[in-house]
């Protein structure tokens, strides 16, 4: 049986529930990929909080809370086939107990390690590259806005850092790739849909600041020490479109 779910982590947990109580899963696909041809029959799994909670509680009690956390971060990786990797890991954990977290040489556990490392590495990159700019909300109030397009679904992982950093200022982090955004105010945040073509106008002062930063970034570069290969290792080129500065515009200082 190929199970199709709504693309949420709770939906995936419901697929694990169906794997046990209905029919073994040969594949688990999010709705966005359900158009692909498959050889096995398909079934849509509805997301139910009760079933998802039962699976989450079972993972925590029979394996460990860390196992559930690792499953969640592996899910956020967005890797094709991650759902079946998580299913295999969970049921392997049911047989091994809490010691599964120590079996890093096992191929099943190693795969989850790789997915967790991918997410963790990109979170660190996002914390260093997210650029906020000042815009106005519909009521004319100032709001900090940043747009990103990471490989992983990680807004919820970077929000605690920025909530601590901007305790009084309202801000928005827009995941253009997934068409959603986290809106924060008064120390709390919510996730809402936001289309990829959303393009706010920056304030006049913000535009002046950005122009000044681009000029500084360009003029301060030492031509003889520019190392494009090293630069792309630390900041892959796919992220450059979300930066204020353009690394390709560096030239000798004047």
Image (cartoon, helix red, strand yellow):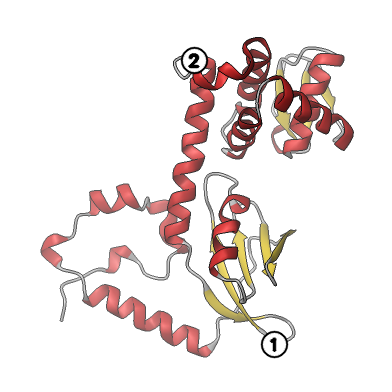
102 on left or right of 245: right
The residue furthest left is 224
Image check: 96 left or right of 209?
Answer: right
Residue situated in front as seen by the camera: 225 or 2: 225
Residue that appears at 53% across and 20% down: 109
Q: Is residue 48 visible?
A: no
**Does 179 sit above or below residue 98?**
below
Please identify the quarter of the rendering in which residue 189 is found.
bottom right
Callout 2: SS:
helix
Query: Which circle marks residue 140 in the picture?
Result: 1
- For marks 2 and 1, the one nearer the N-term is 2
Depth check, front residue: 154 or 26:
154
Instruction: Classify 10 Å Cα crowding around label 1: few (below 14), some (14-19), many (20 and above).
Output: few
Position of residue 156 relative to residue 142, above or below, is above
Q: Nearer the viewer, residue 98 or 42?
A: 98
Q: Residue at x 30, y 80 (%)?
A: 215
| Image quarter in which the C terminus is found | bottom left
In this picture, residue 188 sits left or right of residue 175: right
Residue depicted at 57% across the width and 17% down the height: 100
Residue lying farthest to the bottom in this orientation: 204
Vertically, is 14 above or below 24?
below
* Residue nearest the viewer, comparing 240 with 155: 155
Quarter-wise, where is residue 193 in the image? bottom right
Label drawn at residue 107:
2
* Residue 225 on image: x %, y %: 14, 61
Of helix, strand and loop, which one carries label 1?
loop
């Amino acid at each position: 049986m190929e199970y199709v779910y709504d693309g949420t982590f709770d939906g995936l947990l419901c697929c694990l529930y169906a794997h046990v109580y209905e029919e073994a899963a040969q594949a688990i696909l999010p709705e966005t990929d359900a158009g692909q041809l498959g050889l096995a029959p398909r079934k849509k799994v509805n997301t139910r909080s009760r079933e998802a909670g039962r699976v989450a509680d079972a993972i925590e009690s029979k394996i460990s809370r860390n196992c559930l956390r690792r499953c969640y971060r592996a899910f956020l990786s967005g890797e094709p086939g991650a759902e079946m990797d998580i299913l295999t890991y969970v049921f392997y954990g049911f047989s091994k107990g809490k010691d599964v977290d120590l079996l890093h040489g096992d191929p099943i556990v190693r795969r989850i390690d790789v997915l967790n490392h991918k997410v963790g590495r990109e979170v660190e990159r996002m914390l260093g590259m997210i650029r906020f700019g000042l815009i106005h909300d519909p009521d004319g109030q100032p709001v900090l806005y940043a747009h990103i397009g990471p490989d992983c679904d990680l807004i919820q992982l970077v929000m605690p850092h920025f909530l601590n950093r901007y305790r009084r200022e309202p801000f928005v982090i827009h995941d253009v790739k997934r068409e959603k955004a986290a809106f924060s105010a008064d120390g709390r945040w919510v996730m809402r849909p936001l289309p990829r073509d959303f393009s706010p106008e920056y304030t006049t002062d913000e535009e002046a600041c950005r122009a000044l930063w681009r000029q500084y970034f360009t003029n301060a570069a030492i031509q003889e020490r520019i190392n494009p290969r090293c630069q792309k290792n630390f900041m892959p080129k796919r992220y450059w479109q979300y930066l204020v500065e353009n690394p390709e515009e560096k030239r000798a200082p004047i």
